[in-house]
Image (tube, helix red, strand yellow):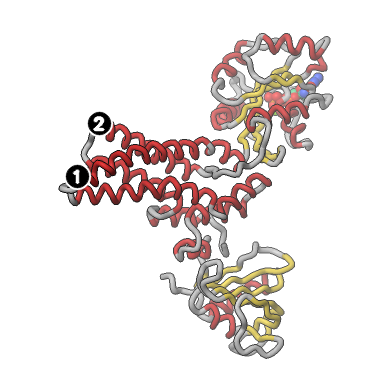
Amino acid sequence: MLEETIVAVATPPGEGGIGIVRISGSTAYFIGLSLFRFSRQVVKPKSHRLYYGHVVNPADGCAVDEALIAFMRAPHTYTREDVVEINCHGGIMPLAKTLELVLAAGAHLAQPGEFTKRAFLNGRIDLAQAEAVIQIIRAKTEQAMELSLAQLQGRLSKQVKVVRQPLLKLLSHLEAAMDFPEHHDVEDLTLAELRGATTRALAETEALLQTADQGRIMREGVRTAIIGRPNVGKSSLLNALLREQRAIVTAVPGTTRDILEESINLGGVALTMVDTAGIRETADEAEKIGVERAKRALRNADLILYVLDLSVEVDTEDREILKSIQEKPCILIGNKIDLITDGLASASEIASELPPLPFVPMSLLEGQGLELLEQTIISLIFQGSVKVPQSAMVTTARHKDALKRTSLALEELLAALAAGCAPDLLAIDLYAAVEALGEITGETVAADLAEEIFRNFCIGK
Ligand SMILES: Nc1nc2c(ncn2[C@@H]2O[C@H](COP(=O)(O)OP(=O)(O)OP(=O)(O)O)[C@@H](O)[C@H]2O)c(=O)[nH]1
Ligand SMILES: [Mg+2]
């Protein structure tokens, strides 16, 4: 029930400068007033102002904490309901005590994401904007932050509406034509318009879809797998990129068995690297599992750093693995150039016999080639620039999926138009496209899906 007043501690648990108890709903004002003693007499607190005083237990008048309180009148609030925020001292006890008093006054403990869900249900933000809220909270890099903020401000929603609105209008024309088949002229006009609008919408949908992979990478980071035969220097590479001795490095082949995952910030985007077990045939049980995991990491990666030891022959196994990953961005790392005579010259000779991939000669032992590798990664994944574009970008799998279904429906609609299908058949495809687009902004989203999205939020948001 929406009228229920909810409360939660909005700041993370633990010790901090301040901690905030947030209340939203029809009785929020009343509850706030009932347990706060203003330092000066206040008859009716003004909206959106901070007042100093004490949180007191209304049962015995005892002070619980010294605090600031803000009363915010609907509809200009986070949830569009009355909201009260109490800024307590940021500790477990002051917050728990204050929360307890609010609950005793009749509020209910908020579910994760419930404040934002109310903002969505009350029409302040759409679903894509609500999703942006949690993306902002989880952003780890500048690019992720910039993209998420743009989405919160409605950049993606606006573009989706640009695509959806004309289709929606045509759908209602089409439905009118179906209801009144005697008005043939309406139908003719609609069909010509429909063809044009569908072609345009398809192009716009495809353009949005094109941004999805880059968008996801900018927001979530580049899933990078460090792959290669045993002992070539994979763990040394992870450590070098991290600038930290994170993985165990030894001269014994088969040192790394489990997957090791670490992130770095490379030019504003996250690079989430997995160091893997060297790929080889092995009888060792643990190593075998490690090799399997390495192969899985390879399949899931956005980028592969394939490490070769230049001091030993490139063998058939290397060539086979390289052949199997051809469709993914891959950088060849020729490691241990310090061990070969005229290092760079013979390195490029070896490279010329390998698949035509970006090649970076390195000596991880002597710390050579790291900068070149970082530049190569940025130019391969981001074509040299990691700037967030000014146009809308798709950043989540959910949006990408909805756009794919939109594109499919529009293609079918064009085929149906070409085949001269009846309006009711055309309406089915058009309806599917309008529905799929509406899922992104939440106009047509199923209730349980919206629930699922908000469940992933934190408490108090
Ligand atoms: N000479 C030389 N030795 C290196 C270089 N890079 C790594 N090594 C050595 O090669 C050995 C293996 O390095 P690791 O980083 O453990 O190699 P790995 O690929 O993770 O090995 P596994 O985990 O066993 O698959 C260690 O003894 C390193 O010191 C290099 O550039 N030059
Ligand atoms: Mg290793």
Secondary element at image label 2 = loop
**Nearest to the observer: residue 36 or residue 417:** 417
**Residue 366 image label:** none
Q: Is mark 2 within 8 Å of ligand 1?
A: no
**Nearest to the observer: residue 245 or residue 346:** 346
The amino acid on which the numbered mark 1 sits, given as a three-letter code, is: His
Secondary element at image label 1 = helix
Q: Is residue 24 left or right of residue 338?
A: left
**Residue 184 image label:** 1
- Give the answer, above or below, for where 353 lies relative to 153: above
Alpha-carbon distance for marks 2 and 1?
Answer: 18 Å
**Nearest to the observer: residue 118 or residue 304:** 118
In the image, residue 9 lies at what x, y percent? Answer: 60, 68
Q: Which one is earlier in the sequence, the residue at label 2 or at label 1?
A: 1
**Nearest to the observer: residue 157 or residue 376:** 157
Quarter of the image with the C terminus is bottom right
Q: Quadrant of residue 275?
A: top right
In the image, residue 141 lies at what x, y percent? Answer: 67, 46
Mark in the foreground, 2 or 1: 1
Count all numbered tags in the image, as a single digit.
2
- Give the answer, above or below, for where 205 lies relative to 180: above
Q: Quadrant of residue 205?
A: top left
In the image, residue 268 lies at what x, y percent? Answer: 70, 41
In the image, residue 29 lies at what x, y percent? Answer: 55, 80
Q: Is residue 258 visible?
A: no
The amino acid on which the numbered mark 2 sits, given as a three-letter code, is: Ala
Q: Which residue is mark 2?
A: 419
Q: Is residue 121 visible?
A: yes
Residue sitting at 40 percent across and 50 percent down? 165
Q: Confirm or deny contact between disc 2 and disc 1 (CB under 8 A).
A: no
- Give the answer, above or below, for where 407 lies relative to 72: above
Q: Residue furthest left?
A: 182
